[in-house]
Amino acid sequence: MADQISDLLRLPDGPVNLAGHDPRATPGFPSKKGKQEQPALMAELATELGGLQERLFAAGRAQPRTAPSVLVILQGMDTSGKGGVIRHAAGLMDPQGVAIKGFKAPTKEELSHDFLWRIRREVPGPGMVGIFDRSQYEDVLVVRVDRLVPKREWETRFERINDFEAELAESGTKIIKCFLNVSYTEQGERLMERLDRPDKHWKYNPGDLQVRAKWDRYQLAYTDVLRRCHTEVAPWYVIPSDRKWYRNWAVAQLLTEQLRSLNLGWPPADFDVAEQRRALLQTI
Ligand code: AMP
Ligand code: MG
């Protein structure tokens, strides 16, 4: 299939209008049957994505200092599906090669350092796929909306983040930033479902309603994130996320296309295969 999800979902350059991105859209989904067809498409992707990731992992073993790595950054409002994407899309890869890190409110120790300190410690090593469930962007989102630091301080962070990401890309990390775009209405339904179902109560936090009440301010903060931190080496992808089946497929497809673009082969043997074969035959 053509590499189209990367193009379709990549945030267009220029002014950002979040309201113009339909959270219920399903661009690029290859079947008219929609949801019904999704499991078969995921199974197909699993094979390709798994193979691509194994090459990346193998490259990390063969060249532990210079192999590339991949960093997936997941951002989105509560219930947008960061966890679902990790389970269903990242879950198609071998867990040995995937490092998942969730960023919560900073600890005392983390607060005593620069905001990028805890982030730098978690960037994926060569051959690895790192996944950030929330990220450095919280430091210009919740921090801004809740006025946790003065404006003059968070204002400087967009540039700091761009510099950090450029440095990371330069050192061989492919950065894939996904904004999971869920609508206010859909979030309401998902929160209600969490209340309706005892097996989902653990996911609910009464504080989620306070965050929901600040929806418009978050949309503004996200708009600035998308506008100011959308770069050639670390572009944003806007993932329509009101339909879970589309969201999970789209991220899996995006990861597949992005890993494909690394053009990785299998590392050549650093031993004499024929000689090893002969030696092994002696033992059989
Ligand atoms: P959850 O993703 O539901 O586990 O929630 C994590 C919480 O940590 C969210 O409420 C985030 O807003 C919060 N959080 C993450 N990073 C930061 C940060 N840098 N400053 C303040 N709160 C944060
Ligand atoms: Mg939560």
Image (spheres, helix red, strand yellow):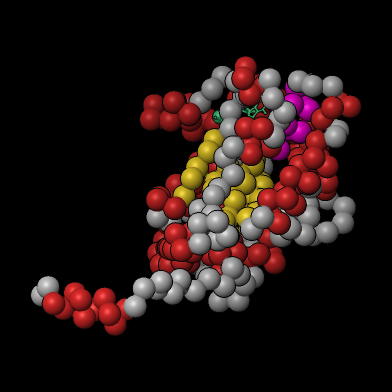
Up-down relation of residue 104 to residue 20 (above or below): above
Of residues 139 and 128, the one nearer the viewer is: 128
161 sits left or right of 29 in the view? right
Task: Name the residue at the left extreme.
Answer: 284
Q: Main secondary structure of the magenta part?
A: helix
34 sits left or right of 225 in the view? left
Figure quadrant of the N terminus = bottom right
Q: Quadrant of residue 79?
A: top right
Number of numbered discs overlaid on the protein picture? 0
Which quadrant of the figure shows ligand 1?
top right
254 sits left or right of 224 in the view? left
Q: Is residue 19 visible?
A: no
Q: Which residues are magenta?
A: 137-146
Q: What residue appears at the point 55 percent right and 48 percent down from the top-left corner?
A: 124
Q: Quadrant of residue 77?
A: top right
Q: What residue appears at the point 44 percent right and 25 percent down from the top-left corner?
A: 201
Figure quadrant of the C terminus = bottom left
Q: What residue appears at the point 48 percent right and 45 percent down from the top-left corner?
A: 99
Task: Name the residue at the top extreme.
Answer: 108
Q: Is residue 199 magenta?
A: no
Q: Position of residue 198 (x, y in %)?
A: 39, 26
Of residues 279 and 240, the one nearer the viewer is: 279
Up-down relation of residue 76 to residue 40 (above or below): above
Q: Position of residue 39 (x, y in %)?
A: 41, 61
Q: Is residue 148 visible?
A: yes
Q: Quadrant of residue 209?
A: top right
Q: Is residue 142 magenta?
A: yes
Q: Position of residue 64 (x, y in %)?
A: 50, 57
Q: What residue appears at the point 66 percent right and 64 percent down from the top-left corner?
A: 6
Q: Position of residue 217 (x, y in %)?
A: 79, 31
